[in-house]
Image: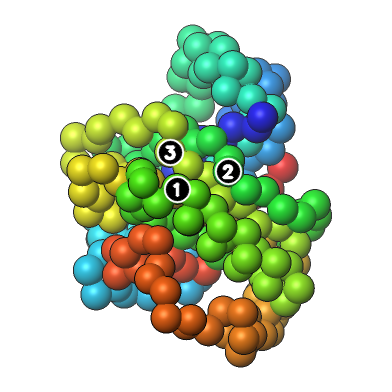
Amino acid sequence: MSYIDGFVLAVPVANKQAYIDHAAAALPIFKECGATRMVETWAEDVPDGTVTDFRRAVQAKDDEAVVFSWIEYPDRATRDIAMERIMSDPRMEALGEMPFDGARMIFAGFDPILITGDGGAMGYADGFVAPVPLGNKAAYLAWVEKASIVFRESGATRVAENWADRLPPGKLTDFNRAVQAEDGEAIVFSFVEWPSKEARQQGWAKVMADDRMQPDGSEMPFDGKRMIYGGFLPVLDA
């Protein structure tokens, strides 16, 4: 089964090209070590939240943008071996100083629980991070299975839902703090891929109008107020 490393970080707007160049230079190393896909997306539509949001998740400053990214591997074993090789590869050190504050980057490993759609050329992505009670995993999966059908019918090319497997604590912030996770909750890192921003806008209008997405009186299997979400433009997808 595939495995995903998910990342959220804050990058100075002035360093955008330097960040893209840095990621592009690291890409061949990750691919040599077994990664099948590396995606970097730049914040385009990231709303402020009532309780938390993407900017607060990484303590973004006024002159910084949020980056939502992930790396895909064929399985967890390949990922573990890859990380050992990558961390000891001298080419990584040769890349020089990172063009962002690594202390505020949040990252974790995730097991996919739902991936639907073949993807293809991606022109836009919606990213989500949410806390889900461990006891609600089956209910959450049923909820996203239904929603993924609506998204696909509305133009999305791929929907991925990923359940936290490894959540390292951070010094300044981390995925748990990003969504104010409580004891007994897991982190879900998910994304919806669209062929373009226009397709995303049209697709969301269809999703919101679909009867299957209307409230039916049942409770959502997670606290939506602590979910963080936003729209992102891909700057690297290889």
- Secondary structure under the numbered disc 2 in the rendered image: strand
| Left or right, residue 89 beside residue 196 | left
Where is mark 1, residue-wise?
137
Q: Residues within 10 Å of mark 3 (few under 14, many from 20)?
A: many
Task: Give the number of the mark in front: 2 or 3.
Answer: 2
Give the number of the disc on residue 164: 3
Amino acid type of the residue tagged 2 in the rendering: Ile
Instruction: Please tell me which of labels 2 and 3 falls first in the chain.
Output: 2
Residue 29 in view: no
Location of residue 97 in the rendering, given as x and y in whole percent from the top left corner: 39, 31
Residue located at (45% from left, 48% from top)? 137
Question: Is 117 rendered above or below residue 82?
Answer: below
Residue located at (54% from left, 53% from top)? 141
Q: Nearer the viewer, residue 206 or 171?
A: 206
Amino acid type of the residue tagged 3 in the rendering: Ala
- Whole-number angstrom distance, CA of label 1 to CA of label 3: 11 Å
Q: Nearer the viewer, residue 29 or 187?
A: 187
Q: Are marks 2 and 1 in contact (CB under 8 Å)?
A: yes
Question: Is 214 rendered above or below residue 120?
Answer: below
Q: Nearer the viewer, residue 96 or 71?
A: 71
Question: Is 216 rendered above or below residue 123?
Answer: below
Residue located at (26% from left, 60% from top)? 56
Task: Give the number of the mark in front: 2 or 1.
Answer: 1
- Whole-number angstrom distance, CA of label 2 to CA of label 3: 10 Å
